[in-house]
Image (cartoon, rainbow, N blue to C red):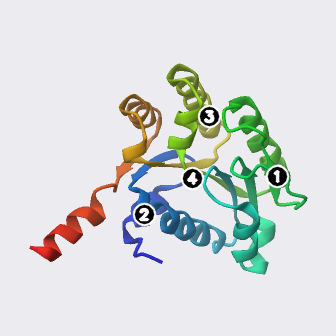
Amino acid sequence: MQNTFFLKDPIAYANKNVSFVALNQKQLKSAIDFTLSTFLAQDQTNLILVSFTQNPIELILNTPQQWRKKLIIIDAFSKEDQKVPQIIHVDNASDLTSIMIAVEKAQKLLSGKIVILFDAMNMLAIYNKKDTLGKFIHIFCNKTRLEERTAILFTVKESTDEEILELLNEFADKAYDFSSLFISAISTLTE
């Protein structure tokens, strides 16, 4: 796993608010894995992962047994309806209503502190018009705050339209941009 030290602040700040984290493509998988394991290791914390990029069965199998009951994956990645209790399948990544309903269903299955992760907002931007996605982000962020939940919205910056980045920055309580972190670190090593 790549070093994900840069996620220390977004994870520490995650308490009944919405954070937005912009990454580059190479950072995404390790950032998701690190964030999942950090939150699941906390005693009273449960996690909902809305996944557009990862195989849910693989994620469940790679999660330690004692944490599996604390994790629900909303699968917008695979085309198959999984028959696993921790996976809620969404037929279409463009169906924002189904995604919101799946998040609400997952919340009812968990108790205690709940953290909601979206692993790739850039994928939502591919399947939805900017205005529609903007309304979804606005409603989701407000609802999350009103319910005193925590959410972290990840996106791959180079794959996300500038207007969507502005919306995510606007509606999040805190925004982080780590997308150029490894590029600048590599360039200084080669000079």
Q: Are marks 4 and 3 in contact (CB under 8 Å)?
A: no
Above or below, 9 against 134 in this view is below
Residue 58 placement (x, y as % from top left): 72, 69
What whole-number distance in Å separates the C-alpha atoms at marks 4 and 3? Answer: 15 Å
Specify the quadrant of the image occupied by residue 101. top right
Q: Which residue is mark 3?
A: 140
Give whichever of discs 4 and 2 has the lower sequence position: 2
What whole-number distance in Å separates the C-alpha atoms at marks 1 and 4? Answer: 19 Å
Point out the frontmost of discs 1 and 4: 1
Residue 111 placement (x, y as % from top left): 79, 56
Give whichever of discs 3 and 1 has the lower sequence position: 1
**Circle 2 SS class:** helix
Q: Are marks 4 and 2 in contact (CB under 8 Å)?
A: no
What whole-number distance in Å separates the C-alpha atoms at marks 3 and 2? Answer: 25 Å
**Circle 4 SS class:** loop
The residue closer to the viewer here, 165 or 175, is 165
**Circle 1 SS class:** loop
Residue 145 placement (x, y as % from top left): 59, 38
Q: Which residue is mark 4?
A: 119
Q: Amino acid at mark 2?
A: Gln
Q: Which residue is mark 1?
A: 80
What whole-number distance in Å separates the C-alpha atoms at marks 1 and 2? Answer: 27 Å
Q: Which mark is residue 27?
A: 2
Question: Residue, x 63% and y 39% (percent of image)?
Answer: 144
